[in-house]
Image (cartoon, rainbow, N blue to C red):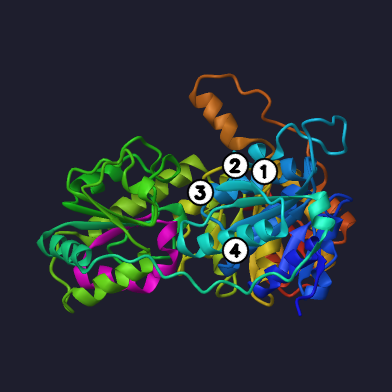
Amino acid sequence: MPETRPLGAQISHMLKDRGVDVIFGIPGVHNQEMYRGIEEAGIAHVLARHEQGAGFMADGYARATGRPGVAYVITGPGVCNIMTPMGQAYSDSVPMLVISSCLDETAATRGQLHQMKDQQTAAGTVCDWSEEARTADAAYQLVDRAFAEFSTERPRSKHLQVPISVLEAQADTPPKPLAPAPPLTFSAGDVAQVAALLAEAKRPLFIFGGGAANAADPARLVLKTTGAASFTTYAGRGIVGPDNPLAFGSYLAKPDSMTAIQNADLIIAVGTELAQVDIWRDALGNSGPLVRIDLETAVLADGQRCDHPIQAEAGAFLAALAETLPGTSPATDWNAEEIARSRARWAAEVDAEYPGIPTICDALKACLPDGTMIYSDMTQFAYAAKEVWDMDRPGHWHHPYGFGTLGYALPAAIGGAVGRPGLPTMAIAGDYGFHYTMQELGVAVELGLSLPIILWDNGKLGAIEASMVSAQIAPNAVVARNPDFVKLAQAFGAGATAPQTLEEMQSAVHDAFKADGPTLIYITPEILG
């Protein structure tokens, strides 16, 4: 016989049946029924210090595991606080499901605890959809809708709210999980068309974005077979191996990357919006035909005006293309030395813009364990690293690319470490962004995570100061008083150190991966001497 429970408890059991093993959140009197069934269902719960932290943890978990990140929050301020992570997950194609309580009625009654004018609509401005379930069946259907869309469409954040009285009411057992949805199909003609274009091209160029992160193997095979050059977006780093001599790297945003793009007689963009945060200009700059392969029809019809739009999942399409291509690499007109010179010039530009940071990046990269997953914040250190730090595999550097929120790195790294127990995870934050979510250090201490936290302190909002100067604005409001970050971390019970040389930094990182809890590694520009 079906077992009835309060709906709040049934939702946790339903999530467990759909593969959820951890929930991030904060309980309150409005959503406490959602907590009734967590332990009973066998789901772990991570108690964040702020709903923004809970959302970033769910985001980091999803990016690390490929499975949806789930967060429980309360009515009103809980939903408002997690809207920033929801916006970040939406812009970066991260599967996140936020489930909140809501008031039973707001039109006729005022002055209720946590009351908002329109919570559902507010949340809907930063996520894929925001819906209210007024019955148990509606809640079950909406959860299944979210999970089905995560696996078949571009994954993005979603919000489900349930009235308090509905969470408290008895509900029947949730339905069994839906059968997996069939994958998005594409035609053999699409594959043949791209193969024919490649056969005729003398300077084919691929651009791989984060939507192709699961397609590294077929992408590398296609590059080898065709002799094509490549760029990756920041989110696509690691798709192309660092040893590929025809790889331009992640320098797509450099203004004169347009020269390489104009010299290509065929551009194939895979899993990328070619958005402002990818190319930092209005147009890609291609003179040859543009093929775009993407899940989303809106991308295929955007202002870049591609010549050959193909709606497909990147991995499946590239695998089919690799099987179609001949086994030998044709001679193309790309010159490896020319590409190497371009990369060297762009690297020098990064070093000029962010003096010394590439040197620190090289030292840091050299001491990391194999397979380290990195979460970075909006900080000059990350801005430089995204261009000069080649990744040997995709999906191992996560950054708040689109929405661009401060405070991302630490809680997202906590979520990533929870999702990959025993595997190396590291956070990189700037001094100002660290203020936003530094309270989540307490979570990392509670969980005993061996998490190095690189804190880059240049004593200011350095990128904003530079932008003001460039705009001929006298810099103001770019310097804030910082605490003693080492003592602050120690007050939370974390390890903390302030290395004075690159060698000391490397030793500190090595020790941090072996520690029984998080370690804050505080560095400043003076580390270069």
Q: Which segment did they paint magenta? A: 209-232
Give percent across and percent down for residue 273.
39, 48
In contact (CB < 8 Å): disc 2 and disc 1: yes
Q: CA distance from mark 2 to mark 1?
A: 7 Å
Location of residue 1 with respect to 191 vertically, above or below = below
Q: CA distance from mark 4 to mark 2?
A: 21 Å
Question: On the rendered image, what quadrant is the N terminus found in?
Answer: bottom right
**Earlier sequence position, callout 4 versus callout 3:** 4
In contact (CB < 8 Å): disc 4 and disc 2: no
Q: CA distance from mark 3 to mark 1?
A: 28 Å
Give percent across and percent down for residue 276.
42, 39
Q: CA distance from mark 3 to mark 2?
A: 28 Å
- The amino acid sitting under disc 2 is Val
**Earlier sequence position, callout 3 versus callout 2:** 2
Q: Give the residue at mark 1.
A: 83
Identity of the residue drawn at 60% across and 52% down: 158
**Earlier sequence position, callout 3 versus callout 1:** 1
Which of the labelled discs sits on residue 126, or is there none?
2
Circle nearer the viewer, 3 or 1: 1
Give the dominant element type of the magenta stretch: helix, strand or loop: helix
**Earlier sequence position, callout 4 versus callout 1:** 1
Q: Give the residue at mark 3.
A: 384
Viewer-proximal residue, 292 or 335? 292
Crowding around mark 2 (Cα neighbors within 10 Å: few <14, some 14 to 19, many 20+) is many
Q: CA distance from mark 4 to mark 1?
A: 22 Å
User: Furthest residue to the left?
Assistant: 200
- The amino acid sitting under disc 1 is Met
